[in-house]
Amino acid sequence: MPLINYITQIQFDFGAVRLLASECERIGIRRPLIVTDAGIRAAGLLDKVLDALGSSSPAPVFDGTPPNPNEAAVRAAVAMYKENACDGVIAAGGGSSIDLAKGVAVCATHDGPLQSFAVIEGGLARITAKTAPVIAIPTTAGTGSEVGRGAILILDDGRKVGVISPHVVPKVAICDPELTLGLPPMLTAATGMDAVAHCLETFMAPVFNAPADGIALDGLWRAWRHIERATRDGSDRVARWNMMSASMQGALAFQKGLGCVHSLSHSLGGINPKLHHGTLNAIFLPAVIAFNSSAPSMQEEGKLDRIAQALGLKAGDEVGDAVRAMTVALGLPRGLAELGVTRELFPRIIAGALKDHSHKTNPREASSADYEAMLEASM
């Protein structure tokens, strides 16, 4: 039976970060741990968060979030959480910081290693209402993790897994587009294509969730019309507002599930954590769209034509080429070869993709041979 559930309170506007102290008070966080990264601190964004928090006793700050958050970072942040007797987590940063904060919220309040909470290890049933409350403050417009029910984390054994539960959803998302005004062009482009991928892939997922489909298509419309503007002129407030909205909308929608784009990106990102998730999504999208085009659910509901309409195209068969052209226009890598990915990695990528939680919600079931063909088409 379809489940349709939206539970995050979202504060969305320029200057919304100033609501942080009142939101902490509302949900009962008195001793927060702030989870962020060194770049957010260096950019002065952490100071804005601390100023908005306005506590007489400074909150402890964990700024060791790696670009792809991992189990070691979760352990280190959990130790800081417990040392300071914290009762909640404030995440400030991109998807990496927010996902790490979610991992901390689970592991600081439950017994067992991070691996035991991975959805592919049966972790969904192990995560309870004891999970510490999280307030998420995104500083990029891409992952939408501030409203998502999952975190993508790399285990000690190298697997990139999802920790997924309704209890992991942040209690509050503070979406302040002003915090994205200084984002560099290539990071704007890569995170923006992540938002595009979320909207596209969740719309293609076959699970019934009509509200999610509507949210995804509107988010796609916003992202497609504003991603080049935001990349070209980072101070464009209208573009930044719309990109943050598109990012948030894509994540609200992807409770439906994602698909082969993400199963491939998760797998390859686990093998090489230096590769940017949004860039990988942009590269994989055209091949996966082509693979999905013949799925019964895609054809019966005219999904490619509906996507084309949101993109301002004439027909569904133009979508894959349009995504490829947008990637080029933004200055992102055109294929895996530009990232140093070789065909020798294909077996490892495919093995990981077949085990990924996103594999199961693609509109067509992909075999090993199908994944190999998608990888080849993405080189």
Image: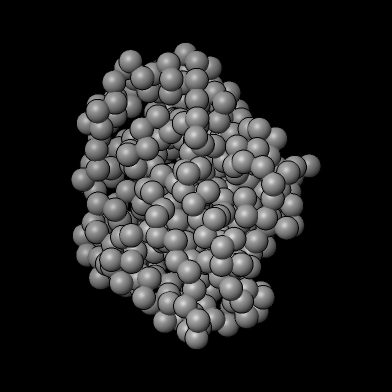
Q: Is residue 238 left or right of residue 220?
A: left
Q: Is residue 355 left or right of residue 337?
A: right
- On the question of residue 42 being in view, the answer is yes
Residue at image point 56% right, 67% down: 84
Which of 94 and 9 lies nearest the eye of the viewer?
A: 94
Pick the quarter of the image with the N terminus: top right
Residue 101 in the image: state x and y as whole percent: 53, 57
Which of 361 and 65 lies nearest the eye of the viewer?
A: 65
Residue 183 in the image: state x and y as whole percent: 28, 62
When the figure is inspected, residue 163 is found, relative to residue 177, above or below; the finding is above
Q: Is residue 321 left or right of residue 17?
A: left
Mark count: 0
Which of 358 and 134 lies nearest the eye of the viewer?
A: 134
Residue 27 in the image: state x and y as whole percent: 66, 74
Residue 322 in the image: state x and y as whole percent: 32, 41
Pick the quarter of the image with the C terminus: top left
Residue at image point 29% right, 26% down: 341
Residue at image point 31% right, 60% down: 39
When the figure is inspected, residue 8 is found, relative to residue 237, above or below; the finding is above
- On the question of residue 8 being in view, the answer is no
Q: Residue furthest right?
A: 1
Q: Quadrant of residue 284?
A: top left
Residue at image point 29% right, 53% down: 187
Q: Is residue 358 left or right of residue 26?
A: left
